[in-house]
Image (cartoon, coloured by chain):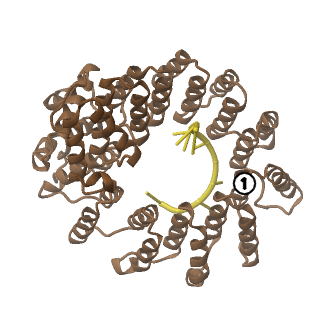
Amino acid sequence: MLSVSARPPRAFRILFQRWCSSVGLYSGSDCRQQGEGGDADPCSVVARLVLFHPGDPRDLCEALSPHLFFTADHHPYADLVDRVLKRLWNDAPRALLFFHALLCHPSYRPAASSFDYALDLAARLRDHHAVSRFLSLREKLHVMPTHRTFAILMERHAAAGKPDRAVRLFLSMHRHGCPQDLAAFNTLLDVLCKSRRVDKASRLFRALGGRFRPDVVTYNILADGWCKIKRAPRALEILNEMVTSGLEPTIATYNILLNGFFLGGQVKQAWEFFLQMKRRSKYGEEGCGCRPDVVSYTIMVHGLGLAGQITKARKVFGEMTGQGCLPSVATYNALIQVICKKDTVGNALSVLEEMVGRGYTPNCITYNLVIRGLCHAGAVDGAAGLLERMRREGCDPSVQTYNILIRHRCEAGEIDEGLRLLRGMAAGEEGGGCLPNVDTYNVLIRAMFVRKRAEDMLTAGHLLVEMVERGYVPRRFTFNRVLNGLLLTGHQALAREILRAQSDRGGRLPREIRLR
DNA sequence: ATAGGGTTAG
């Protein structure tokens, strides 16, 4: 079924269309009819149209107009545009094709939020030209960059290993008509902390803090940064510094610390800290901001459970209601996760039924946790049943749901079943559907090298092509492995095409492969 | 999208 050896882009499209037709989804020019039939969600219709389009932005623009340009002033709803961009998130090149197609329309003026999505996508592809093109177009159309724009770009710089550029961007933002205020400063510190550069954030805080009058949020960001790199003692220092400077810690501050102790494996300290929070809020003066809230209890249940103290976790869970604090879905999720990990799936399922009985609506994460637990226990049928139930309850499976199921199928040697799931997710049976991400491809490609049939190499090759087409950069190891596999099984043509397709994508290829 | 709690596995 996978014996296609045309040029990769086309090969991929053929492959993709075959998959879709095999699960009853219309492809190509049939999309529109499909959209006008049972499925009326314009977001899905447009997303499909974009996915199956040959790829010329002008043609696509024309094809889109009946679906998008239906307001009086011929502008698509910004909300719909944003939703489509989000739906196509895991296929960044296609998402940007969509954006380009819209720009072909003479009267289209993107909303700031749509520009932000497009910028994020281009930056994730490290397409610097596209980023600067979008920025200058934005200026030309008088769509001012917002705080969010700068947050996105700063985050991309930090993720690309260029934190200094994030700082410089912050220092330049007022020149682009965006106020350089405390909120923006806090965002910068958060971006640095979340990319584990807490020390840099601290130094910046010392250097520039005077200019922005740090608030509770500033200190919380820094404390959380230290906690995330397992240095709760430093976070405690931040807490003290905060009090010294006359700021009152909030419950968020205490929760950051509480979680920090668990992250650093200091279970005993976490427990002591929690007791202190309870004691002080009981006997302290009124309005004391350290009374444990639902987040504190969730952290306790999760932390104690992961440390193997299931009984204690259940006890804390059981006592919270009496303390006037009702569990949230997240609290149940924490409990379900730790019971899956340290106890049995059966008991986790009981908790699921219990929460439903009390009127809670499990979310996607809840189902994923239990499905993972069931897969791990080898109860495939149970997992499939939960997938059914999840759909029935109107909770669309996420990429993670599919990744769990696919990984499990592959580990059980049922690779074809894994591939079938991949097709199913793209088609999105009923409801939204979601596109595979890097993990999906990596799991499946790896599985091909476990079975190692000749045709598996070809499948791996096609998966790699598809992955690259969708803007992902495979690891060098994966790349070499697939190429070697193709060469050894006599698929020189596809190997060559993969090399060509990759270098077309702008030289983001590992070096020794590019020299050819 | 200015801060805190649930999905990952070697």
Taking the image as shown, residue A310 lies to the left or right of residue A29, namely: right
* Image spot of residue A183 (x, y percent): 51, 70
Residue occupied by mark 1? A264
Which chain is the one coloured brown?
A
Position in image of residue A271 (x %, y %): 82, 49
Outermost residue to the top: A381
Disc 1, SS: loop
Q: Quadrant of the N terminus of chain A?
A: top left
**Between residues A433 and A230, which one lies in front from this camera angle?**
A230
Residue at left 24%, top 30%?
A490
Viewed as shown, does residue A363 lie left or right of A96? right
Depth check, front residue: A422 or A70: A422
Residue at position x 61%, y 74% from top?
Answer: A202
Q: Is residue A74 visible?
A: yes
| For residue A23, above or below residue A338 | above
For label 1, count other residues whose C-alpha is less than 10 Å away and answer few (under 14), some (14-19) or many (20+): some
Give the colour in which the image draws chain B: yellow
| Residue A475 appears in the figure | no
State the residue at coordinates (34%, 60%). Answer: A123
Q: Residue furthest front?
A: A488
Of residue A379 and residue A276, the one placed in the foreground of this image is: A379
User: Horizontal and vertical percent for residue A204?
Assistant: 56, 78
Amino acid found under the numbered disc labelled 1:
Gly
